[in-house]
Image: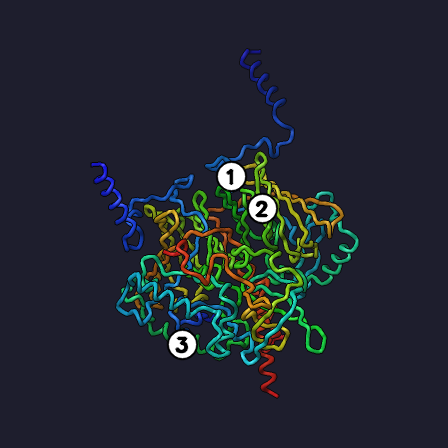
Amino acid sequence: MHKLAILITGVGLLATAAPVWAHHAFAAEFDSTKPVKLKGTVTKMEWINPHAWIHIDVKNDDGTVTSWMVEGGSPNTLLRNGFTKASLPVGTEIVVDGYQAKDASNKLNGRDITFPDGRKLFVGSNGQQGPPDSKSEK
Amino acid sequence: MQARYAALVSAVIFFATSSPAAEPTAAKSWLAPRTPDGQPDLQGVWTNSTLTPLERPAEFAGKPVLSEQEAADYVKQVLQQVNSDRRDGGTQADVGRSYNEFWRDRGNNLVADRRTSLIVDPPDGKVPPLTPEAQKRVEQARAWMRDHSTDGPEGRSLAERCISWTTAGPPMLPGPYNNDLQILQAPGYVVILNEMIHDTRLIPLDGRPHVAPGIRELMGDSRGHWEGDTLVVDTTNFNGEVSFRGSDANLHLTERFTRVSPDVIRYEFTIDDSTAFIKPWTARIPLNKTNGPVYEYACHEGNYAMVDILAGARAAEKKSAK
Amino acid sequence: MSWRKQIQILLLGAAAVLAPANAQNQAYKPARTADGKPDLNGIWQAMNTANWDLLGHSAQAGQIVALGATGAEPPGIGVVEGGEIPYLPAAAQKKKENYANRLKLDPEVKCYLPGVPRATYMPFPFQIVQSGKYILISYEYDGAVRTIYMDNPGPAPVDSWMGWSAGHWEGNTLVVDVTGFNDQTWFDRVGDFHSDMLHVVERFTPVSPNVLNYEATIEDPQVFSRSWKISMPLYKHLEKNAQLLEFKCVEFVEELMYGNLRKQPSK
């Protein structure tokens, strides 16, 4: 079988000088022309790799309920930040902002996941958004 | 007399710890503890997250090292640029950012010596030019990927196929998250376990030859030996499936691991691939101690995305065919 | 009779009395690691057909005609003590369904991680690396790997394919308590399965320089009416320069799993 050397894609395609890596192309999975914003209650969370999936039930305007699946990142990140399976109990209300799957199924990427009051659902305990962590530098 | 002596001692300590060199000058006299069988001890859980790019950005051409202020400014700029909590730039960019910044493991800083590239040789901090044949091969591969990226699984990256990540390589380079690895040592072996994708390298130290040339592996065949306090790992027998910046199956990789302090392993790798690059090149990335454990990363078992990407492409084709 | 001969007879008699009738385990004194523990380092492999079927089974034709004898199932004496897997009634029915659909349902077909204890008796070698509070087992099959934590690691933080392993020594035996499994793996190719309440206790005991005695006690109140046990020897690879090679099978199953989604579908 002809083996094609697959390049590490993405080199030089990003403007940023930060390290570039062959990451999962979300643009291939989700449709940028189909933005979705949902409010729903958590029914289940799949702690699996490569991406965790949060299942939510969304009450539609007509009173019916639709189930959606929200794609997150690696749950290993959750574990390292002290989250456990108990951290997101069934029934929690969350707001999800993302883009629908290209195959039109009820899936979206969790582009931004917050509580209804706007607080981010997942916040790093070692302050990823904060000042440099001297322990990890060098 | 005592006060002057004390002042002298503290002055020495001050200069030793504020040196701008890659490692503190104290490191030259610091020796790693030994494992029970006498190997320098590299064991622990380590991460190679860093904001320093592999290649020197154009804005820093001719500038191998940044000052403290320049580094601080650059870090701020980069973190702001890559922060995936940003929602600007239109929907294409937005989808590409995938999810909240929380999920990333970029590291918060440049490497300690504030180099502007992980590449230390050649001195311009860039990957050397490809040979003409390699250039052609790479262009053909790029063109094929462009035209067939959703035809089937082969059109996706090895990472998306859950086959291999650059985190494990080898050589080992940081990825977007889960950049941790564990090093274990037993008599006659050094073992490297990378979280992504649960890849384990079992490196024998007994001087045995490489496997036969007909045996080719994605991660190559590794052999290790100690040169003083530095573990030298020699890897050949690559199958060429991973093309690292254009490398091929002739890649001869040399990695060097030296524990320079309790919390840092100096990791350096040299790419020698004469059918791909016109000359060898070397990069250096510190491995910093971090908390374990290394968690299971069962990638293929949960790879909904592969189905979604291919099904999405088929759905889009059906729609445009109507 | 010379006094020398008398002493010889006396010594032989004493030896006969003192030697244990059972030549296995406790008589054997294994080599020790530098920190004084029995040395399990090495490349090992089971030599049986437990991966086909844990219970005793005769040879059978394979499911893929084109594979001929190479796809046929080899026979096996069985590794289950007592010769019975004690399924609860509903679970016994599920096993029948698993068996009938094993080509579609066996996670091994899709190159999924094998779980524990199946990883032990896959027909591939594995390497044990012992380093103080970590014992790592690296399996050639699919590069599966698990770390046995020897320092009381607490409960499993999350479910996983290979489980969460906590180990301790009892004499010369490494005892490994494995919990935190998901419900996705099978025990063999004929559909023996478990739920996410699976609890496995393994015992690795060196009985000679090149043989470990391996036992695994399996408990799962959602599937079995009581715990049950498998046992088998594990043999050391003695060839010069023995090493694990890559069996990265994900690529081998992409056509199977995604072929129907290709632009030019093969199915």
Residue B83, image x, y percentages: 45, 68
Q: Amino acid at mark 2?
A: Gly
- Secondary structure under badge 1? loop
Q: Quadrant of the C terminus of chain C?
A: bottom right
Q: Is residue A122 visible?
A: yes
- Quarter holding the N terminus of chain C is top right
Residue plotted at (63% across, 22% down): C17
Give how far apart the Cα atoms at labels 1 and 3 are: 52 Å
Is there CB contact under 8 Å for labels 1 and 3? no
Does residue B286 lie above or below B26 as drawn?
below
Residue B282 vs residue B135, the one in the foreground: B282
At a point 33% along the width and 43% down the height, the residue shown is B31
Which residue is tagged 3?
A: B139
Report the chain holding disc 3.
B
Report how far apart the C-alphas of labels 3 and 2 lie in the structure.
52 Å
Q: Which residue is mark 2?
A: C154
Q: Is B113 situated left or right of A55 in this image?
A: left
- Residue C189, horizontal then vertical, whole percent: 67, 56
Q: Which residue is mark 1?
A: C39
Q: Are marks 2 and 1 on the same chain?
A: yes
Count of numbered labels shown in the rendering: 3
